Image: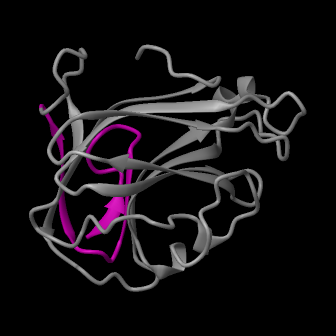
Amino acid sequence: TTGGYVTCDRWLADIDTQGTWTLSQSTDVPTGQGFANSFKYDCTTADASPAAGDKINLQQRLEGQNLQYLKKGTSSAESTTLSFWVKSNKTGTYICELLDADNSNRHINKSYTISSANTWEKKTITYDGDTTGAFNNDANRSLDLNFWLVAGSDYTSGTLQTSWGANTSANRAVGQVNLADSTSNEWYITGIQLEAGDSASDFE
């Protein structure tokens, strides 16, 4: 019912008063891709009506010293491409967010669609480079990668922020489905890769 680093190394489960969940490292993976495990969310107590401030996302916080190659905050800022495999019985729109913790939580948010229930699908999302706000070159938190799963109206009542801009909570997860609306709901993810450029390379 609350968040933390509770399942897989470096992955933060951000759960804010929205249902009850069993989180696990699963052996359910896409066939023939070389992956041994996936991260699984399993809803065990449903909440079909999230309060305004309720949210759930899966997050990794990246250190600035590992991001200097993106040249963020310069005229040469690199685009970034996210690729991953995802599976759920809950079809519909989901949101992936990049959030700049060094520069007042500037953010960019893109959607993807789970089209087929209970089927592994590969998704690729490209984010433009940001010419505003460099990442600090240190071992501290600079960039959050957020996979949204539930969002209350505080995060959905605006217009999705599909280009880099100042943080506006209402624009962070517009259109996001409510994965917490049934105890039948499960969500799996694996093969996550975030890299510079406009296209996804094979998983390394």
Vertical comparison of 54 with 13: above or below: below
* Left or right side of 62 for 7: left
* Left or right side of 185 for 83: right
Q: Residue furthest right?
A: 75
* Left or right side of 99 for 90: left
- Of the 4 image quadrants, the one containing the C terminus is top left
Q: How is the image coloured?
A: one colour
Is 198 part of what is drawn in magenta? Answer: no
* Left or right side of 83 for 118: left
Q: Position of residue 35 (x, y in %)?
A: 24, 21
Is 4 part of what is drawn in magenta? Answer: yes
Q: Residue at x 22, y 57 (%)?
A: 90
Q: Nearer the viewer, residue 104 or 31?
A: 31
Q: Residue at x 67, y 70 (%)?
A: 168
Q: Residue at x 68, y 36 (%)?
A: 64
Q: Start and end of the magenta stretch? A: 1-27
